Image: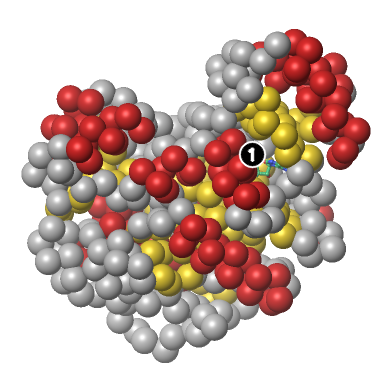
Amino acid sequence: MWPVSVAIVKANSTRGEGRTVGIVGGGQLARMMAEAAPELDIATVVLAETPNESATGVADRVIVGEATNLEDLFALAAGCDVITFDHEQVDLGHIRALLDAGHRVQPGLATLEVATNKVTMRERFAAAGLPVPAFTVVAADAAPRAVADAVAAMVDQVGLPLVIKPERGGYDGKGVFVEDTLDDAVARVTALSKLGRVLVEAHVDLAHELAVIVARSGAGEIAVYPPVETAQMDGMCREVIVPGSIDPVVADTAAAIARRVADLIDSAGVLAVEFFVDPSGDLTICEVAARPHNSGHWTIEGALTSQFANHLLGVLSQPLGSVDLTAANTVMVNVVGADDGRDPEALLTSLERSPTVVPHLYGKAARPGRKLGHVTATGDDAVAVRDLAWATTRALGGAMPSGGSLNAEEE
Ligand SMILES: Nc1ncnc2c1ncn2[C@@H]1O[C@H](COP(=O)(O)OP(=O)(O)O)[C@@H](O)[C@H]1O
Ligand SMILES: [Mg+2]
């Protein structure tokens, strides 16, 4: 289904036809989109909060402003063929205003309504018969009695702990609360319901997690990258293994579900679908992100067309590039700021270079716990590739999980 291609030259064309993509946000996802753009004959403009963000040194043009400010969004839209996103912190009313004024926005409202709201996401997927963990929704500003009853009913149904999430605003595990007691769960839901609706769900017993990147062009063409194993630490993605330990039947099921999700919400560009896999191999959807995603960074080296290139092509409704693999095994490890504050940029020059491992640093100031970059290793030997990715992360001064890699104790 996902052949390893013998092609030496990466997918490379001028299919962007000189068009300009405007990106809301100036983070590392915008940076990697901007890096992918020139060889596709695409220009990029980013709307960044400051002149010194990850993408600002790479994009063709930078507009300094706020993603939540309508005037700034209009400034971005002027001169761009389509607007797309580096993050989800956008006001859907503003998107509607851009559309009403005749600007193109991809992914569009139907996708963003689902992808930017964890409650809408769960409800829409459940209604479509897609597998999701058992959940209930507590209304914004719910009365104390209603909160207590809803939480108690969930504990009766699925037990403790419960996982509690505000409908909007979470990322990298900020906005995921695991509560072990009924009282703590009630207190958490009560506090969060002051801000909006609250998702209360079963804590899934995780054998592992996986993710599927689906590229879809505005014209409806779909390409599905192979499902990959992902490992989160404290809610943040740390490692992605291709193909990892995913059962082939589970992989095919996940790919089929991800394709259904992309069609259901009419995605354009890249959609990441995160899944939970329980010990019996049952899949449930964790969440989706309607943009390039950390679980797809490996595609820069590991696939013929990167997720960033296919995102740009998809939002421009251009034909997509091949998602064939370039290697039998690929491992991506995030370079996360270590507690000693060491700056990976300073260690880059002394890094021993190898054609099979590529460091990507995002140009961000080093801070403990901050995603500063990632490394991707490729090759034939799964164990060697993984060791190389972690050794390179260590050489760059990135934070190391105890034991050297996330699942070290299993090896
Ligand atoms: N219901 C759950 N059961 C078990 N683990 C969960 C559950 N929900 C979230 N998690 C863990 O928290 C991580 C982040 O949750 P997610 O909903 O994807 O939030 P974020 O937007 O921060 O990525 C997941 O990848 C998973 O490791
Ligand atoms: Mg997530």
* 132 over 411 or under it: above or below: above
Q: Quadrant of residue 99?
A: top left
Give the x, y percent position of residue 282.
Answer: 77, 61
Give the x, y percent position of residue 357.
Answer: 47, 65
Q: What residue is drawn where x is 82% and y is 21%?
A: 149
- Residues 35 and 42: in front is 42
Q: Circle 1 — which element?
A: loop
Q: What residue is drawn where x is 63% and y is 18%?
A: 192
* 32 over 223 or under it: above or below: above
Tell me the quadrant of ligand 1: top right
- Residues 273 and 381: in front is 273
Q: Quadrant of residue 62?
A: top left
Q: What residue is drawn where x is 30% and y is 61%?
A: 218
Outermost residue to the bottom = 6
The residue under label 1 is which amino acid type? Answer: Gly
Outermost residue to the front = 127
Ligand 1 within 8 Å of the CB at mark 1 = yes
Q: Which residue is mark 1?
A: 235
- Residues 90 and 309: in front is 90
Side of 209 where 162 appears, left or right: right
Give the x, y percent position of residue 225.
Answer: 49, 70
Q: Is residue 347 visible?
A: no
Q: What residue is drawn where x is 57% and y is 46%?
A: 124
Side of 403 where 355 appears, left or right: left
Task: Count how many numbered circles sit on residues in the image.
Answer: 1
Circle 1 Cα neighbour tier, 10 Å, few/some/many (<14 / 14–19 / ≥20): some
Quarter in which the N terminus is drawn: bottom right
Q: Is residue 93 visible?
A: yes
